[in-house]
Amino acid sequence: AAVYARHVKILLEEYSCSNNGVPFLDVDELDNLENLSYAVSCSQRFLLLLTDRVFSRPWCAIEIAAAHQRKVPMIVAQLNDDRALCDTHSLRAVIEAFGPTDRMVFSQNGVSQEQLEQAYLFVGALVPCRLPLNDAGSTRIQACLQFILSKDFTNNSRNDKQDASLCASIIFDSNDDVDCSIAQVCSTLLRRRDVDTIICNSEAVRRNIRGDESMLHVGLVLISKGLTADPYALGSITMMQREKGAHL
């Protein structure tokens, strides 16, 4: 979940402009948990990523309740093909499962069980947008981000290629959603430093992995358990090894 959240924040940074403010990610403020409710109340929008444990985490619950109480516009996003249980029975069961320590934290932050239940049921009734983080193609991701930001940013992305002297092919297990997010985060961070990038996740990309001959071409391999079982990854590594002047 942490990787997905970081990926979404970077995407929002790429596509939002100055008048949309700065994306706030709660895990960046773990040293100031008491300020989370205030940060939420000052937000223009509240984006909830529907991961499998988001409703069962006490501080996430406090943020959800704060957004609901302060009427911050809320958007829920379904990540990739994952589906969090948002039906009334499941949400009430999660609330009942919070222990005494959790309830004390809720009370200290001004959240009652009734307020939490109202907030959870409100979220459960929202229609989620689908955010396909495992899709390296930007069109579907842009559509969801446009909905989140309520803005047409087709020509506002910072993802445009720069005049680069270095090209990096990012090779990873394309069957693993977390690896897909990590690869795209790496790609974005490299492009910010004027490094051209190729995300190797399909046969078409693998066949055209060779970069501009005037550029230094390097391969960034994300090692994971499933890497050796991914034909796209293995094919990309082979192509890199055959390419003269390329570095892995």
Image (cartoon, rainbow, N blue to C red):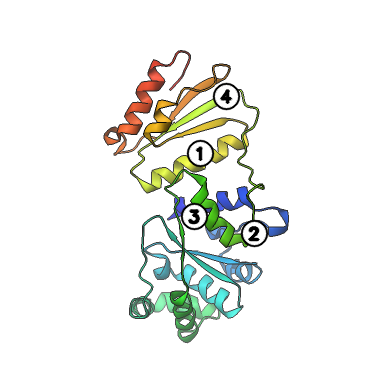
* Label 3 with label 1: CB-CB less than 8 Å: no
Q: Which mark is first along the chain, 1 or 3?
A: 3
Which mark is nearer the camera, 2 or 1? 2
Q: What kind of residue is marked 4?
A: Leu
2 or 4: tag closer to the N-terminus: 2
Mark nearer the N terminus (1 vs 4): 4
Residue placed at 35% from the left, 38% from the top?
A: 173
Residue 7: in sight, yes or no?
no
Whole-percent x and y of residue 181? 45, 46
**Which quadrant holds residue 73?**
bottom right
The label shown at residue 166 is 4
Separation of marks 2 and 4 at Cα, in angstroms: 33 Å
Q: Which residue is mark 1?
A: 186
Q: Which mark is residue 151?
A: 2
**Sequence order check: which comes first, mark 2 or mark 1?**
2
Rounded to the nearest angstrom, the CA distance separating label 1 from label 4 is 14 Å
**Within-10-Å neighbours for mark 2: few <14, some 14–19, many 20+:** few
Q: Residues within 10 Å of mark 3 (few under 14, many from 20)?
A: some
Point 36% across, 59% down: residue: 82
Three-letter code for the amino acid on which mark 1 is drawn: Cys
